[in-house]
Image (cartoon, grey):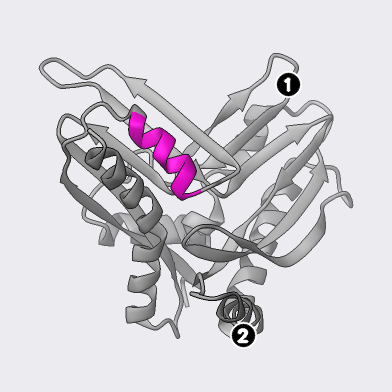
Amino acid sequence: WSIFQVVLSQRLSRRTTQPIPLPSTGRCAMHNPSPYYGFMRFPGGVGSPPLHIISASPEMHVRLEEGMAELRPIAGTRWRGATVEEDIALAEELLEDEKERAEHIMLVDLGRNDLGRVCDYGTVKVEELMTVERYSHVMHIVSDVRGKLKAGFDVFDLLRATFPAGTVSGAPKVRAMEIIDELEPTRRGIYAGVIGYIGYDGTMDSCIAIRTAVMQGDMVHIQAGGGIVADSDPQREYEESWNKAKAMAEAVKYAEQQR
């Protein structure tokens, strides 16, 4: 086998009556409360309108504070339940799913390996393993991996070692990216990239650009995907990608209705 997992995505595109996306940004926070929000505006090229990026990402890419590097890989998803009881049952089912557990552990190990390239030997540890985090439309399995950055290394070395995240590419990374390039019909652009900041003091915090909309002119694009392994259920993976895109799509739709 040349690949264990590949994270394939689909781009959802449509015309919008909300060309100025600031109202969508506010609605995004209401529809999909997340630890990371981003709004960016880039000038268009010659004859092209400005490009806007709106993001409400649940997933840290990498953080560096006081010499400690941290990753919080997300892998394993279920939709939210219609009742408290159903929600609890879905979370329990998610944590007990052998396929989801195996994929998550594989990606935690990939994160440990990434940090091990730039962190002191013996300092890379899993501080938190397989907890459930809930968002408006989905819930995820999340872990926390940390290590002490080696002397002489900086945020750029850390980014180089960890990019792209295994949770949005797959494992092994290089082969996964080759398959993504073969199968996805469009370039990803900002999707699955990184949004964040780097401080003058050498600290940084960043998130993976998922749950992200790109708006240009009268078009809006939202991309979402999921990890594919040998025993994946195609219909379930397809539905999962739609569930991940829903909150951002609803935020844009609500902003359009308020005009």
Q: Nearer the viewer, residue 5 or 244?
A: 244
Q: Provide residue 162's location: percent of width, then percent of height.
A: 61, 44
Q: Say which quarter of the image contains residue 61.
A: top right
Q: Provide residue 105's location: percent of width, then percent of height.
A: 67, 70
- Residue plotted at (63% across, 77% down): 88
Residue position marked by numbered label 1 in the rendering:
202
Location of residue 3 with respect to 175 vertically, above or below: below
**Mark 2: which amino acid?**
Glu
Residue 210 seen from this side: no
**Mark 1: which amino acid?**
Gly
* Earlier residue among tags 1 and 2: 2
Q: From the viewer's perspective, is 65 left or right of 187?
A: right
Residue position marked by numbered label 2 in the rendering:
98
- Secondary structure type for disc 2: helix
Location of residue 225 with respect to 25 vertically, above or below: below
Residue density around tag 1, few if under 14, some if 14–19, many if 20 or more, within 10 Å: few
Q: Is residue 30 magenta?
A: yes
Q: From the viewer's perspective, is 119 left or right of 212?
A: right
Q: Nearer the viewer, residue 201 or 242?
A: 242
Q: Provide residue 106's location: percent of width, then percent of height.
A: 63, 69
Q: Which residue range is magenta in the image? A: 23-32
Q: From the viewer's perspective, is 47 left or right of 248?
A: left
Residue 72 seen from this side: yes
- Residue plotted at (35% across, 27% down): 22
